[in-house]
Structures are given as C-alpha cells and as structure tokens.
C-alpha cells in the first residue's frame, strides 16, 4: 500500500516546527500581552509562535502531497557520543577539573569516528590538555579549575 | 579627498603591531580553516570569539574578519590540488582548478586563485570605503518602522537567494527569532521562556547556538561520510603563470569582482553565491581558450575573485545598517555586541576607528594572504592530509572551553550540546541552519524596533505601510517571496543550484 506520507522529512520537520510554535504560544499565556501601543513581553513571541505553528502545519500538510526523499540515516550513535562528550565535559569540569573533563571529552568524541586510532586519541587528549592549560589558564588567566573538587576530596 | 584621509586614518590603526599581528593570525587561521574540510569559518569564528574577549573591539574584528576572507583563499588550495573544496565557496573553483592540476598546471592555477583573490580584495576595500559611509548616513534617517521593515526584508531576502525549501527556511527564521527572544525582556524586565533557569536570564548566548548548530551538528554529519581524501593530482612545479595566462585572467577577474561585490551586499549573499554566479556568468560571457570545466584558467579566476569580493562586501550591510547578510556577519554583529559596540549606522561615524581600521586591515590581510598562499603551498598541502579524527575532538574541546569562558557556567555547555542535537536533527530533515542564526541575532533588535514604532505611532500598525521607505521595503519582501514561489522562478532557482 502506498504510503500516505509522501515526504517523511517534511512531515517531521513540520511537526517539530509546529510543536515549537505551540510551546511559545502556550507558555506565553503566562506573560502579559499588553496592547499594540505598549507591547507586553508576550506580544511578539505569541504572534511569532502562532506564525511558526502555522508554517509548521503548512509544511506537514504539504508533506502529504509533495514527494520528498525518505528519512536520512540518523547517526544516533555518533550524535550521542559527540553530544554526550560535550555534556560530559560540562558535568566533569567542576568535579574532575579541566584535565579530567578534557580527557573524557576527547576520548568519547574520538570513539564516534569509524577510523578511530586509540593511541592517537590518547595522545591528542594529552596534547590538548597541555595546550589548554597553557593557553586558557595561564596566558588568558581564565578561571578554569585544573583539577576540580574530586581531587580535593582525595587530597584535602 | 575624504575617503583618502579616512583610509589613511584606518591604515594608521591597522598598522599597529597588535592589529597587524592579529590580522596576520586571522589570515593564517582563515587559510587553515579553508584548507581543512570539515571546519568552516562560522564554526571557527564562533570558536575563537570567546578568546577575543580580552582584546579591543577593533582588534577582535580585524582577526575574525581575517578568518572569513582568509578561508576563501585556503579553500581554493584544496579545491585545486585534490578536488576537495575546503570551503563551499570553492566548489566551483574545483571544476576547472582540479582539471588544470591534472594537466600539470596546478601551480598557475594556485597562483591565479591568489592573484584574482587579491585583486578582488583590493577593489572591494575601496568599494567599502566609498559606499559604506554614504549608506550609513542615509540610514541614520531611518526610524524604527524603517528598521523593522528593513530587517524583515533582509531576512526574507536571505532565504530567497538560498537553496532549499522556502517554507522551511522561513520556519527556521521564525524559530531563530523566537529563540532570540528568550531571556529577560529588555523593556519590562520580565523573564521570558527561561523555565526558572537563571542562567537564561540574559538569553541564550549566540556562540552557543552557532557552535551547537554549525559546529557539533556539522561534526556528526561529517562523521557519516568516510574520510576519503585523494592524493595530490601531480607534483607542483612552476608556480608562476605565463604572461598569456595573466592576460587571460584579467577580464574574468574583473567580472568576478563586479558580480561578487554586488551579490555580497545582498542579504543572503556572500562568498558562496558570488562564486557560483561568477562561474555561470563566465560560462555565458567569457571566451576561454579551453572550454569551462576542462581546465580553463578563467574558470579559476572568476569564482575566486568573486568569492573574495562577496566575502568582503557582505560586511557593508553589517557595518552600515547592523543587518547581517549571512551567518558569518551574524557572528560579527554578535562579536560587536559582546565588545560593547552597538551595531547600526552610527558605527561609521561614532566608531570611526573601528570602521576604518577594519577596512584598512582587509587590504593588509589580502596582502598577507597573497604572500602566504604561494610560497607556503607545500605546507598547506601537508596539512590537507591531517585526518579528521584528530581535528574534530580539538574543535569540540576549544568550543566547550570557549563557551565556558564566556559565562563561567556549565549550563551553557549543556545548552550547546542540546543545540548540537537540534542542529543535527534539522540538517537531517533538510532544514538549513543559517536562517536560524540570522533570525536569532535579529530577533531582539526587531522587537525593539517594533515596540518603538508602535509607541510612536500610538498603536497604529499601518505606520509600516504609510511611511514610504518602510512600505517600499515590505513590498519588495513580498514581491521577492511571490517571485520565488512562482513555478517558473522555482525551476530556475533549483537549476541554478544544480550547477554544482
């Protein structure tokens, strides 16, 4: 049976846009709209949110009519590793310090490549740690904790 | 003449040791960015923006600008040598450039790219100096209604000229506008859409959005493709082009510069569109000895001069009106805001040191690039073989540290990861990320102008239509949209992008 959805990418995109639009409209109900002369905080966001919802619906409806390419391969593994590496860095930075966080970031990120060469990844991590410590902490004087709170627990 | 005194003033600013050094660094970094596929000027500028925090605004912009037009030089190197354009604007250069390399004429091809780029760089520096100040002066008479309509026109025009689905691009713009409004409302101080996160009180940092959508998402996308890089076509001997070559590249270079200058100013314009258009023009108008596509030196000169011209003239709307015509300019505006410079027509007069210093630095930067690119080709060639698996973790590391350094909260790092996921999802669904960034930067400015216009007109919404300039701009936007939606125009647009 021929699929009802002619363009799955457009349908998904349209739904996502509509969802975002609705969020802005609904949450915007909590803020005062004001008048046209004195626009409140909700005025423009609610209007734009409505516009976005309308465009999203239009795209979704069009997806039922206009032919489009099938859904592309979604590299959820790579995405999880890369985004996860960044998030892990954020979580580890105050706890394990720049050194620990950076090593985890580089190794997790490197794992996402099909052509990963582990000794190179480790070497890269060491290189970046040294470089960052010099460039960011030392010369630019940024308050980046090198070791973090965990190490303070080990050696108070 | 006024221009000359101003340029002289600008040169005196640009020639300080700090600014000279930063211009050089920007040029080198830009070349690197152009050479390394998988790293583009948007991600690089977003990554380095936090590092410029300690610098003077002029110095910061000089360096960041150098990255943008430097990338136009670097991208052609890989396009010619291994048929792998490092920059999207060099895609067209690869068509003839690589063919020339295969016939053993890589040297003249590279030299042509550098020379025509330099020519374009010099000419557009003068164009900037000549046209920006009068434009800014005219814009000083704009009221908030005109500004609002101008921003609408700019946003609409940016998607009209872009490829891909118009509706989706519009949706991305609106989403960008909405995301830009997150945070404390300037006028009422009411926290909007912050969901209780006090880190969002100042809104979402634009570096976060840029790095997430253009950096992280791009990386995941690049990892999907295997890292295949062909070896060099042939060795590089004989760098210098012959006198006959030089005669042949003159006309295409001039044409390319002209088209690049025009298209760069248009919103949505910039290096990419300029290079494509110049190549098409050259095909129709040029008289090459060898047909275009088979190693015609004209096919290298035209797009290369165009992409440089386009890159530099795209600074005009940014510097004179405060309107970004492409994502790089959006980041430049963000950089200005970060350094406490209010973008808009007053920049030319009130921040004249910044303005003229930046313009003069472009000429100097182009000179650096001309000198850098030819003798150091061997070095660049070696860098091409650097595996992507070593590059992208470094990009992530610098971005994460950079983002943290701006606000000192790990919240922003999480936010960047979220935007990375969002950006990847959008890319996989054929939604261009560039309009999102443009809308994001413009959002707050649009609201401010809308509010002011409404207050001045006492709530009368027709003010946008009664004021003549505003009406013209809005009409143009509507016409542009309608024109693109017409079936005939739609087909030509799709064909134009199929050329690549």
Image (cartoon, rainbow, N blue to C red):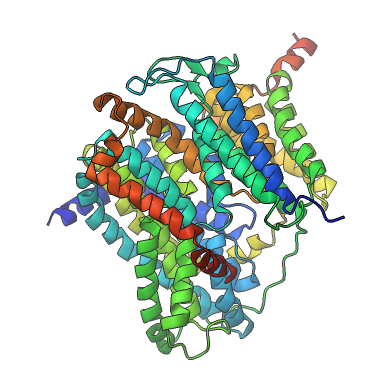
Determine the residue located farthest toward the top in the rendered image. A156
Q: In the drawing, does residue B64 fall left or right of residue B434?
A: left
Q: Tell me, yes or no, if residue A66 can be seen here.
A: yes
**Image quarter of the C terminus of chain A:** top right
Q: Position of residue B252 (x, y in %)?
A: 40, 78
Q: In the drawing, does residue A136 fall left or right of residue B242?
A: right
Above or below B13: residue B441: above
Residue under the image location 70 percent in, 45 percent down? A11
Q: In the drawing, does residue B252 fall left or right of residue A78?
A: left
Determine the residue located farthest toward the left in the rendered image. B1
Q: Position of residue B193 (x, y in %)?
A: 55, 21
Q: Position of residue B206 (x, y in %)?
A: 51, 34
Marks counted in the figure total 0
Residue under the image location 55 percent in, 42 percent down? B171
Above or below B323: residue A133: above
Above or below B45: residue B102: below
Residue under the image location 68 percent in, 35 percent down? A129
The residue closer to the viewer here, B489 or B128, is B489
Residue under the image location 29 percent in, 56 percent down? B128
Q: In the drawing, does residue B332 fall left or right of residue B475?
A: right
Say which quarter of the image contains residue B274.
Answer: bottom left
The residue closer to the viewer here, B34 or A45, is A45
**Image quarter of the N terminus of chain A:** bottom right
Above or below B382: residue A123: above
Determine the residue located farthest toward the bottom in the rendered image. B289
Say which quarter of the image contains residue B420.
Answer: top right
Q: Position of residue A62 (x, y in %)?
A: 65, 50
The residue closer to the viewer here, B354 or B452, is B452
Q: Tell me, yes or no, if residue B62 can be seen here.
A: no
Say which quarter of the image contains residue B265.
Answer: bottom left
């Amino acid at each position: 049976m021929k699929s009802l959805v002619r363009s799955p990418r457009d349908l998904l995109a349209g739904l996502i846009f509509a969802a975002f639009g609705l969020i802005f409209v609904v949450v915007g109900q909590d803020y005062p709209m004001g008048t046209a002369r004195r626009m409140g905080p909700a005025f423009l966001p609610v209007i734009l949110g409505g516009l976005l919802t309308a465009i999203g619906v239009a795209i979704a409806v069009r997806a039922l009519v206009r032919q489009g390419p099938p859904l592309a391969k979604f590299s959820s593994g790579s995405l999880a590793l890369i985004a996860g590496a960044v998030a892990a860095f954020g979580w580890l930075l105050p706890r394990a310090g720049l050194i620990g966080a950076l090593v985890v970031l580089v190794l997790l990120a490197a794992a996402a490549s099909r052509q990963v060469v582990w000794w190179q990844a480790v070497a890269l991590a060491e290189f970046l740690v040294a470089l960052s410590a010099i460039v960011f902490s030392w010369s630019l004087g940024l308050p980046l904790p090198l070791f973090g709170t965990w190490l303070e627990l080990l050696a108070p | 003449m006024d221009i000359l005194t101003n340029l002289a003033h600008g040169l005196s600013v640009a020639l300080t040791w700090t600014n000279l050094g930063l211009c050089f660094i920007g040029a080198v970094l830009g070349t690197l960015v152009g050479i390394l596929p998988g790293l583009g000027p948007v991600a690089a500028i977003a990554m380095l923006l936090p590092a410029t925090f300690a610098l003077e605004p002029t110095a910061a912009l000089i360096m960041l600008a150098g990255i943008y037009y430097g990338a136009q030089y670097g991208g052609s190197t890989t396009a010619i040598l291994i048929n792998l354009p490092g920059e999207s604007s060099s895609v067209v250069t690869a068509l003839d450039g690589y063919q020339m390399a295969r016939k053993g004429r890589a040297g003249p091809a590279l030299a042509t790219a550098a020379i025509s780029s330099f020519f374009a760089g010099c000419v557009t520096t003068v164009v900037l100096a000549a046209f920006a100040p009068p434009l800014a002066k005219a814009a000083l008479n704009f009221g908030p209604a005109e500004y609002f309509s101008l921003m609408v026109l700019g946003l609409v025009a940016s998607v009209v000229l872009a490829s891909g689905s118009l509706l989706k691009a519009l949706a991305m713009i609106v989403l960008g506008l909405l995301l830009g409004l997150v945070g404390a409302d300037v006028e009422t101080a009411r926290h909007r859409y912050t969901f209780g996160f006090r880190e969002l009180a100042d809104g979402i940092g634009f570096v976060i959005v840029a790095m997430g959508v253009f950096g992280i998402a791009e990386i995941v996308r690049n990892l999907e493709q295997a890292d295949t890089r062909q070896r060099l076509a042939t060795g590089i001997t004989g760098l210098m082009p012959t006198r006959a070559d030089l005669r042949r590249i003159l006309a295409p270079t001039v044409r390319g510069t002209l088209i690049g200058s025009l298209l760069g100013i248009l919103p949505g314009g910039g290096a990419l569109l300029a290079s494509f258009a110049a190549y098409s023009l050259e095909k129709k108008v040029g008289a090459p000895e060898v047909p275009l596509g088979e190693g015609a030196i004209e096919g290298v000169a035209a797009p290369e001069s165009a992409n440089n011209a386009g890159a530099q003239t795209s600074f005009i709307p940014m510097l004179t009106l405060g309107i970004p015509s492409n994502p790089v300019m959006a980041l430049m505006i963000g950089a200005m805001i970060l350094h406490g410079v209010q973008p808009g027509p007053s920049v030319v007069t009130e921040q004249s040191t910044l303005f003229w210093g930046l313009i003069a630095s472009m000429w100097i930067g182009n000179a650096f690039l001309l000198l850098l690119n030819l003798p150091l080709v061997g070095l660049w060639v070696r860098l091409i073989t650097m595996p992507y698996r070593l590059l992208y973790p470094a990009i992530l590391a610098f971005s994460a540290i950079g983002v943290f350094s701006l606000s000192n909260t790990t919240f922003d790092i999480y936010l960047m990861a979220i935007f990375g996921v969002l950006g990847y999802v959008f890319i996989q669904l054929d939604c261009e990320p560039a309009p999102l960034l443009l809308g994001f930067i413009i959002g707050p400015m649009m609201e401010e102008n809308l509010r002011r216009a409404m207050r001045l007109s006492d709530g009368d919404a027709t003010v946008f239509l009664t004021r003549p300039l505003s009406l013209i701009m809005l009409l143009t936007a509507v016409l542009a949209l309608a024109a693109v939606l017409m079936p005939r125009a739609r087909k030509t647009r799709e064909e134009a992008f199929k050329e690549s």
